Image: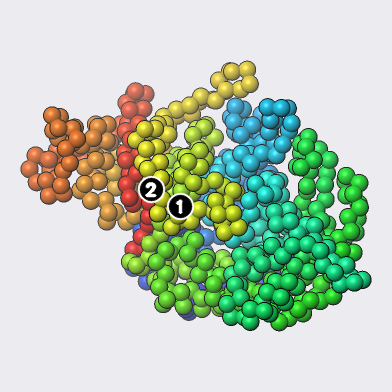
Amino acid sequence: MNTRSLIRAPLFALSLLSIPWQVSAELETVTNQAWNIAAVRHVLHTFAYGGFASDGQIMRWANMSPQTAIKEILTFDETNLKLSPIEDSTAQSGPFLSSLQETWSADDPDNLACPSDQLRYSATRTRNDGEVILSNGGLQNTWIAAVNKRGLNTFAHHVGFWLVNYQMAVNTRDTEPSLVISLYDQALDQLRRGEPFHRILANGASSAAVAREYGHRNNRYNNRNGQFIGNDDFAREFHQLFFRINGDTEDTDYHENTTIEHTAWILTGMQLDREPFFNGTTLSHYWWTAPIDFTNHMDASGRNIQNNRQHISDAPEVLHQPITGLTAEDKLFNLAEVAIQHPESLDNLPVAFIEYFADDNLTDNKKEKIRKSWQAVVGNTDDFLHFLQAYAISTTFHDASTYKYRTAFSRNLTIYNQNTVDNEESYGNSNTPRNVMARQGAVAFIPVHDVFGNQTSLNAANSQNLFKEAYNNNVNHPNRIAKMREVCRDASGRIVSTWEKDWARRMPTNASGLYNVKDAGKWLWRRFTGDSGRNFTVLERAQVAALLAAGRDFASLADSANPDRLYTAAQLKSGATAALLSSLENQTLSLNSHSTELRRQANRRVGMAINFITMTPFMFASGGN
């Protein structure tokens, strides 16, 4: 943790902690009648990869006022017991990626991860030539596992992922996984403590990960002759990427030669420390450490670091304000306070937030409401959280015109979460969506657009390859979703545990205690798509019912001589096909049977139905009403 940023907390918090949160007057809150189970699920799917709330909890939230419910659903607390109930000791190792990675990679009897999986989470890996290097895969696997564990806050980890992969667009190909984890964990901690958004961005701007990626760790300023040596790469991105200030409202000469140039001067005295054999690595390329020490000092490798001496001592003018401070860190935090209030930032940042999380169809009217809502809270404690909370219960979000294409991250991680029955399965099932997402153009912490961020929803929607890959994955590899069981072995090959699918843990029964096919189909549809059920038409019902009741396509049951026949909705609503559908939906699933064979068959059929549901168009986009 960056102790310097932790020390600052009381300076802004004392005057702001007493400010009560009020839903923004600019965003009209949905009525209690419109705030229903479908609305709650829409929030969960949009902001928390579906979350892990029980059906009962979702119903309780739906029966609350939206203002009360949203403060329980969306929090940045280390644990959110209602969104992600604690099942085991996982929460004790969280919430930070560094501690989770250490726990899950440890050769320890208390480690819940399967021994054969522990290397997947390791901070390092050994190359074929014997060199030990930092592992991108270990970082990616740890984050995916964190999103998939009950007891960890899925909403907080979604926001942390967005901050690093999109808003700050840090790329582990340009920096090191250890520096990225440090940045990610600091952001989580700042969110948890309610720091204003501009301070989270300032902490990122003064981080070792960003200084390593953009190269300004080598920037220096000679205070004797006023000579600057270095680049202005991040000076530009500080404004354009972090704060969305493009200079559109400024004189071009002033923006380029004062704002950008002087920001580059501020980004001096940011050399990184090196620690020989850091984390056991054998190549010096991996020995950079975080956080940056902005003083004049000697690092662990014996290098004489002159960060204070090489930093500009004056207060250069940026955005028409003199930016004071003894170090680059001090000046970046002071500059962030100015930048967050710049008219372009006030206009562009909140729209960028909502375009990422929630809506690909923002009208001018929506944008104006979103901007005013952000302006009402910006700079206050928990400003970003309160902004998202107000938006998540607004008529602007819960509107028929709202739609959001899912990125390969959003789609696959939501499926992964909703298809995971409990933490025992999460630890025991080695099938994660990491490779599937990569084939669909989405790799965590390696933004596909480099400084412009990772895969966007529009990238996904316009990619024929993504749809093809997703479809083929379900058709050709159904067991990735419908997997039934897996054994866990230790290093000697001895079986130490066995995981087996058990949908009876989650699926509700009817009044008679039975798992009715019709009810099960509706429940699965709503669970995975987040849809209210309006798109679960007779066409989808027929296929899901056939898979649940018989484990076969509906057409093969209706006309064995023409198993590829396509039926219209009208045909399914009358005659023999309607009778067949009714018969299938009235059957029951043997999820609680005393027979192991029947239980496994029922669970496999549920998996087949999920496999079908997750390749329908309704898993590639979500609507607002």
User: Which quarter of the image is occupied by the C terminus?
Assistant: bottom left
Q: Residue at x 43, y 52 (%)?
A: 460
User: Where's residue 611, x and y in %?
Assistant: 35, 39
Dot 1: few (<14), some (14–19), or many (≥20) neighbours within 10 Å?
Answer: many
Q: Earlier in the sequence, mark 1 or mark 2?
A: 1
Of 456 and 516, nearer the camera is 456
State the separation of the CA atoms marked 1 and 2.
13 Å
**Which numbered circle lies on residue 267?**
none
In the rendered structure, are the residues bearing label 1 and label 2 in contact, judged by CB atoms less than 8 Å apart?
no
Q: Is residue 411 above or below residue 359?
A: above
User: Where's residue 330, x and y in %?
Assistant: 79, 68
> Which residue was labeled with disc 2?
464
| Secondary element at image label 2 | helix
Q: Is residue 294 above or below residue 340?
A: above
Q: Residue at x 33, y 66 (%)?
A: 400
Q: Amino acid at mark 1?
A: Thr
Dot 2: few (<14), some (14–19), or many (≥20) neighbours within 10 Å?
Answer: few
Q: Is residue 145 above or below residue 452?
A: above
> Which residue was labeled with disc 1?
407
User: Where's residue 144, x and y in %?
Assistant: 55, 43
Q: In the image, is 5 to the left or to the right of 480?
A: right
Question: Residue 44 falls in which quadrant of the image?
Answer: bottom left
Q: Viewer-nearest of labels 1 and 2? A: 2
Of 281 and 119, nearer the camera is 281
User: Which quarter of the image is occupied by the N terminus?
Assistant: bottom right
Q: Residue at x 15, y 47 (%)?
A: 568
Of 385 and 254, nearer the camera is 254
Q: Amino acid at mark 2?
A: Gln
Whether residue 90 is visible: no
Q: Residue at x 25, y 46 (%)?
A: 540
| Secondary element at image label 1 | loop
